[in-house]
Each structure stands twice: as C-alpha cells, then as structure tokens.
C-alpha cells in the first residue's frame, strides 16, 4: 500500500510539473492576451493543485496522519483561479473591444460586461 501511495504522489508531482511547463510555454508563445491568460490559469490550477495533493499524500505517508491544509489550499486554488481569470478577461473585454463590434446578446439585453455604459461610447474607460 505504501508503494502505491508513493507512486501516486510521484505521478502527481510529475503531472504538476508538466502542467507548469505547458502553462509557461503557453504564456510565452500564444499571441493574443486572452489566450495568454488561458494557458497559465488552467496550467497553474492543475499543476499547483496536483503538487499540493501530492504533498498531502506524502505527509500522510510519513506521519501517518491526514494533512488537510494542502487539500484546503488546493480547493481554494481550484475555486479562485478560474474566477480571477474571468475578472481579468472581462476587464480585457471592457477596455479593448468596442461595444459596437460585439454580436447581440441572446436575450436582446446588453452584455453584462458593458451593462450601464452609455450608448455613445465603446463601453470602455473615458478618454482623457
């Protein structure tokens, strides 16, 4: 049983490292800011999350007790990283893409990102 848990921890660490390398490569190579946001967000969530779970398994093997701190940090990361990426994407949409160039929303209402913007401007910040 110990050998199987050590193998699981090793596979999680290797998988986390692979996801970290892929996310870094995507950050450097992808051309669009939205694509550059997507690559490291997904990779860091999976990479750091798997490394934290591997640490929890390893601590459980060495001490014989369960380590919930690492699991809770991983859960927090899984919940907050996609939300922060969403907020960054909405900010990019609000500041860079003109409101008039967006397709109409499905229900006929305004896009949530541009809600409350005056019809005459792009929905972005005021020009100085």
Image (cartoon, rainbow, N blue to C red):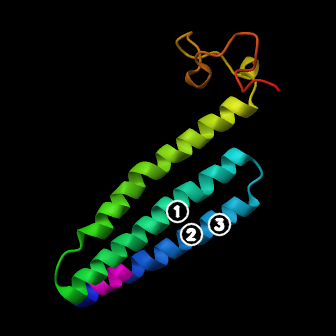
Residue 17: image location, x then y, percent:
52, 75
In the rendered image, which residue does mark 1 sit on? 44
Give me the residue at 48% from left, 79% from top. Answer: 14
Residue 7: image location, x then y, percent:
34, 84
Residue 66: image location, x then y, percent:
19, 75
Q: Residues within 10 Å of mark 3 (few under 14, many from 20)?
A: some
Range drawn in magenta:
5-9
Give me the C-alpha separation between circle 3 and circle 1: 9 Å
In the rendered image, which residue does mark 2 sit on? 20
Q: Residues within 10 Å of mark 2 (few under 14, many from 20)?
A: many
Please indicate whether residue 128 sits to the left or right of residue 70 in the image: right
Give residue 89's mark. Answer: none
Q: In terms of secondary structure, what is the magenta stretch mainly?
A: helix
Of the two numbered discs 1 and 2 on the same chain, state the one appearing first in sequence: 2
13 up-or-down from 38: above or below:
below
Q: Quadrant of the C terminus?
A: top right
Give me the residue at 60% from left, 35% from top. Answer: 90
Query: Would you say the residues marked 3 and 2 are in contact, meaning their CB atoms lie under 8 Å apart?
Result: yes
Give me the C-alpha separation between circle 3 and circle 2: 6 Å
């Amino acid at each position: 049983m110990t050998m199987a848990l050590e193998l699981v921890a090793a596979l999680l660490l290797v998988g986390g490292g692979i996801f970290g390398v892929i996310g870094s490569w995507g950050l450097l190579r992808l051309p669009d800011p939205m694509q550059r946001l997507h690559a490291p967000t997904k990779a860091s969530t999976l990479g750091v999350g798997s490394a934290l779970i591997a640490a929890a398994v390893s601590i459980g093997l060495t001490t014989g007790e369960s380590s919930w701190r690492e699991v809770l940090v991983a859960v927090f990361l899984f919940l907050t990283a996609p939300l922060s990426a969403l907020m960054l994407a909405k900010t990019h949409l609000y500041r860079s893409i003109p409101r008039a160039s967006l397709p109409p929303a499905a229900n006929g209402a305004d896009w949530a990102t541009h809600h409350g913007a005056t019809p005459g401007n792009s929905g972005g910040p005021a020009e100085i």
